Amino acid sequence: MTHNDINELVRQDKAVRVGPDVFYISKHELLTIKKAVKYTCARPRKRDWLQIAARPLVAKKLVSLIDELGVESGCEEWGRQNRDAEREAGLLSDDTLLMGNDGEPVRAGDIDKPKAERLRVLPEMVECDCGHECGAAMVMSASMGTACPDCYDMMSD
């Protein structure tokens, strides 16, 4: 596809140019995807909506659900359909951890339940060389061994 062909598609509102990238969706679809990402992500980033916009069939499916059901219901239905497809393909089990809308980890089997009914997912706790116990994701490597965030300066001698 030539540069002139792409410019013509942009003029006809069949494509959107974002920096060096060209997405074959309309401006309405791009704005709707941005709304969906703002709704679903605790901290939305540009790459979140770029990933959806880069796949036109996925983007158009999401936009049609949001146009039909509204942002909240459309996003929930889209997520439910994607999870069902992943379960059928064997890519998702009920124990798989997903990120909930509030940024907290949720088991895939509990994601459609209200927050009060979900089983709480606790982080894996480990003991650091400093003697404290903290979440495995919080452990830092210092020159004198592993350390929790509070002891990092002391352990980095």
Image: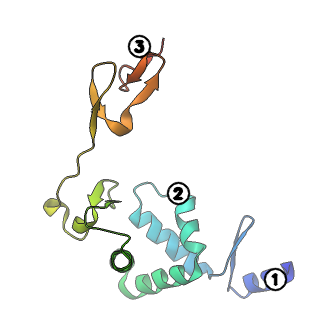
In the rendered structure, the answer to whether residue 53 lies left or right of residue 36 reads: right
Q: Which residue matches tag 2?
A: 45
Colouring mode (rainbow / by chain / secondary structure / one colour): rainbow
Q: Which mark is residue 1?
A: 1
Asked if residue 102 is positioned above or below residue 8 in the image, the reply reads above
Residue 138 at what x, y percent from top left?
A: 37, 35
- Judged from the image, the secondary structure of the residue bearing numbered disc 2 is loop
Mark 1 vs 2: CB contact within 8 A: no
How dense is the environment of label 1, judged by Cα within 10 Å: few (below 14), some, or many (20 and up)?
A: few
Q: Is residue 53 above or below residue 4?
A: above
In the displayed structure image, the side of residue 41 where residue 5 appears, left or right: right
Q: Secondary structure at mark 3?
A: helix
Q: Is residue 57 left or right of residue 94?
A: right
Seen in the picture, residue 38 relative to 26 is either above or below; the reply is above
**Label 1: element kind:** loop
Marker disc for residue 154: 3
In space, the residues marked 3 and 1 are separated at their CA atoms by 59 Å
Residue at horizontal 39 percent and vertical 65 percent from the top = 40
Name the residue: 48% across, 84% down: 61
- How dense is the environment of label 2, judged by Cα within 10 Å: few (below 14), some, or many (20 and up)? few
Q: Earlier in the sequence, mark 2 or mark 3?
A: 2
Dot in front, 2 or 3: 3
User: Between 89 and 73, which is closer to the camera in this rendering?
Assistant: 89
- Where does the image place residue 102, in percent across and percent down from the top left? 32, 57
Q: Position of residue 81 (x, y in %)?
A: 36, 80
Tag 3: residue type? Answer: Met
